[in-house]
Image (cartoon, grey):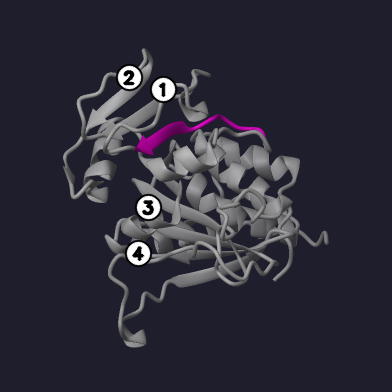
Amino acid sequence: MQPIDVSERVWERMLAVRQGRACACCGHWSPREAEAIALYGPLARRDLGPVTVAQIGQSLDGRIATVTGDARDVSGPDGLAHLHRMRALVDGVVIGVRTALHDIPRLTVRLCPGPNPARIVVDPRGRLPDDAPLLQADGARRIVIQSVDRARAPGIEVIRLPAEDGLIDPAAVLEALHDAGLSTLMIEGGGITISRFLEAGLLTRLQVAIAPLLIGGGQQGLTMPSPTEKLADAIRPDTRVFSLGSDVVFDCGLNADAQAAIEAVHDRPRRSAAP
């Protein structure tokens, strides 16, 4: 495993793949550039049908925040750059309302060139205020998925879905977003929202970015609603490992579509003899 090299020409190619103007399998690349294409190529493609990827950044001991809730610096600088690249490659980013209220994210692309994705918050009770940063107008779509009959500010799209025990079915969320024209989606947080999509079998890929720090306590990254009792029944995804530099990412394929996307890229980008 060696650090990936997201060179300017690699990233230009990934954005072109996203737009359907290029393929991810051709070209001559250095070994590190080829690794970068292997990581981002499957997500950039739009010809393999809907894709739902989840991404979570955590510490070596599996924490995403301290006991006081501080989560801002869990990922290192390369882990943050990776997250922004992921945002640039998807159609929309989904978070739960608790993450929106606590972390006050913008969900924009700032650390790399690329378009801002649609920003989507699952907010069953309509708690998120309209002046939240992720709902501010900047040309990207802003979508609130809620169960209550609450009007939103002009320009904010509202999707009404029923809730049970205060929760909206993840499958219904995906179906509604696909109907809204968003096919490649990233579930960015928090850990509970990601876990619900994972347990429901709705994720194509799961990326776990691990930063080299030990927190010692605080919120766990992934906690399944119905955890397995036997290791024999645990999810064992097909996993690839990439060094981002400051962080290491485990890229986990969770269904046949994930493997097909890897194989399509792993014709694989041709490597030159350059180091």
Q: Quadrant of the N terminus?
A: bottom right
Q: Are marks 2 and 3 in contact (CB under 8 Å)?
A: no
- Quarter holding residue 172: top left
Residue 166 drawn at (x, y percent): 23, 46
| Residue picked out by circle 2 | 152
Instruction: Please tell me which of labels 2 and 3 falls first in the chain.
Output: 2
> How far apart in space, not on screen, are marks 4 and 2 (Cα)?
37 Å
Instruction: Determine whether the residue tagged by mark 3 lies in a helix, strand or loop.
Output: helix
Of badges 1 and 3, the one in the foreground is 1
Quick one: label 3 or label 4, which is nearer the N terminus? Answer: 3
> Disc 1 on helix, strand or loop?
loop
Label whose residue precedes the other's in the sequence (1 or 3): 1
Q: CA distance from mark 3 to mark 4?
A: 19 Å
Q: CA distance from mark 2 to mark 3?
A: 23 Å
Which callout, 3 or 4, points to the residue nearer the camera? 3
Name the amino acid, label 2. Arg
- Residue 255, numbered label: 4
Q: Position of residue 59 (x, y in %)?
A: 62, 65
Which residue in the protein does label 1 denote?
130
Residue 180 picture quarter: top left
> In the image, what residue type sits under mark 1?
Asp
Label 2: how many residues lie within 10 Å, few (<14), some (14-19) or many (20+)?
some
Q: Which residues are magenta?
A: 113-122
- Are the two marked residues, 1 and 2, in contact with CB atoms closer than 8 angstroms? yes
User: Mark 1 and mark 3: span between their CA atoms?
Assistant: 21 Å
Q: Position of residue 221 (x, y in %)?
A: 49, 63
As rendered, which of 67 and 227 lies closer to the eye? 67
